[in-house]
Image (cartoon, rainbow, N blue to C red):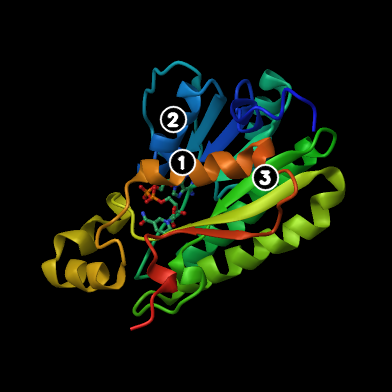
């Protein structure tokens, strides 16, 4: 390790890195995008939501990532504009209790398609990819088999990508949030019974905030985790460690 890298601030620096965040206008994605931009990364948000974001170091593209051809054209355009892609954070996702296939299409297939396209751009210089899994990647939860299946499969897709592309110095890891306060968890949070059930399972006794994922993300996208790939990191207030 050279002497510059020995300084902690340099080891974890994300300055001037070009970073795509899919689902970057979501509850978690947008908080992370702003924190990254504040730390001088060049952030490129892709989200199907339309929004006029004016924020230093953040560029926004509206696109539905279910459309593979449109996704390929968009990544070509981004690559041409910025010259390289260093980091990809897949923070898009849906939880649809009424449709098995909608969860699979968004949370698994669109992530697979987009990541393959980005990996092709990363092959010459290497890169780091973070996929958002879930407690549902480890445990079964009721009434949403599509979400559980999509997140279980995504966990393994990450490992498969990690071993296939390690030779290009492309690292791929998972972050699995526990219960984080966003639009996705709002309905259950507002219902006293289901909120208390969840709180009783979380050793910290509270939901997490999106900002509390940032440390783990910075670790995974920076040189601080240079020799780590194919791993699962749960930021869950202790949920998965708890028995009865
Ligand atoms: N919030 C939690 O407690 C929690 C827990 C575990 C896992 N996660 C995962 O973390 C990620 C982020 O969750 P969140 O809470 O920020 O959700 P969110 O609903 O606030 O944000 C998701 C974003 O993804 C975007 N999106 C969805 N489908 C898209 C598509 N086809 N093309 C482009 N953009 C699309 C949405 O527009 C939205 O902005 C998701 O993968 C989710 O499954 C969240």
Asked if marks 1 and 2 touch (Cβ < 8 Å), the reply is yes
The structure residue drawn at horizontal position 65% and vertical position 55%, both measured from the top left corner, is 112
Question: Mark 1 falls on what kind of element?
Answer: helix
Relative to 222, 198 lies left or right = left
Quadrant position of residue 235: bottom left
Specify the farthest residue to the bottom. 244
Vertical arrangement, residue 146 with respect to residue 114, above or below:
below
Q: Which mark is residue 35?
A: 2
Q: Is residue 243 left or right of residue 188?
A: right
Disc 2 residue: CB within 8 Å of ligand 1: no
Along the viewing direction, whichever of 57 and 176 lies nearer the viewer: 176
Provide residue 121's location: percent of width, then percent of height: 77, 36
Q: Please tell me which residue lies in front, 140 or 73.
A: 140
Q: x and y percent of residue 26 in the render?
A: 38, 42
First in sequence: mark 1 vs mark 2: 2
Percent across and percent down for residue 55 are: 41, 18
Residues 171 and 20: in front is: 171
Judge the density around disc 2: few (<14), some (14-19), many (≥20) Cα neighbours within 10 Å. some
Tell me where residue 187 sits by quadrant: bottom left
Q: Which residue is mark 1?
A: 214
Residue with the mark numbered 3: 225
Residue located 71% across and 28% down the image: 5
3 and 1 marks in contact (CB < 8 Å): no
Spatial distance from mark 3 to mark 1, Cα to Cα? Answer: 14 Å
Q: Residue at x 65, y 32 (%)?
A: 11
Q: Is residue 134 left or right of residue 41?
A: left
- Residue at the extreme left: 192
């Amino acid at each position: 390790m050279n002497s510059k890298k020995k300084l902690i601030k340099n080891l974890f620096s994300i300055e001037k890195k070009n970073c795509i965040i899919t689902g970057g206008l979501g509850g978690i994605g947008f908080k992370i995008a702003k924190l990254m931009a504040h730390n001088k990364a060049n952030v490129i948000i892709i989200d199907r939501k339309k929004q006029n974001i004016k924020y230093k170091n953040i560029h926004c593209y509206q696109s539905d990532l279910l459309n593979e051809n449109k996704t390929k054209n968009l990544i070509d355009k981004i690559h041409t504009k910025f010259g390289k892609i260093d980091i990809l954070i897949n923070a898009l996702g849906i939880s649809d209790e009424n449709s098995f296939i909608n969860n699979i299409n968004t949370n698994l297939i669109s992530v697979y398609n987009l990541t393959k396209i980005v990996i092709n751009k990363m092959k010459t210089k290497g890169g780091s990819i973070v996929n958002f899994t879930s407690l549902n990647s480890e445990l079964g939860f009721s009434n949403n088999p599509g979400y559980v299946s999509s997140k279980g499969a995504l966990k393994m897709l990450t490992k498969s990508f990690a071993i296939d592309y390690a030779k290009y110095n492309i690292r791929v890891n998972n972050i699995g949030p526990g219960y984080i306060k966003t639009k996705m968890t709002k309905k259950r949070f507002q219902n006293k019974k289901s909120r208390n059930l969840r709180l009783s399972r979380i050793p910290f006794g509270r939901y997490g905030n999106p900002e509390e994922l940032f440390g783990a993300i910075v670790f995974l996208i920076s040189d601080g985790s240079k020799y780590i790939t194919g791993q699962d990191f749960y930021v869950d207030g202790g949920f998965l460690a708890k028995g009865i």
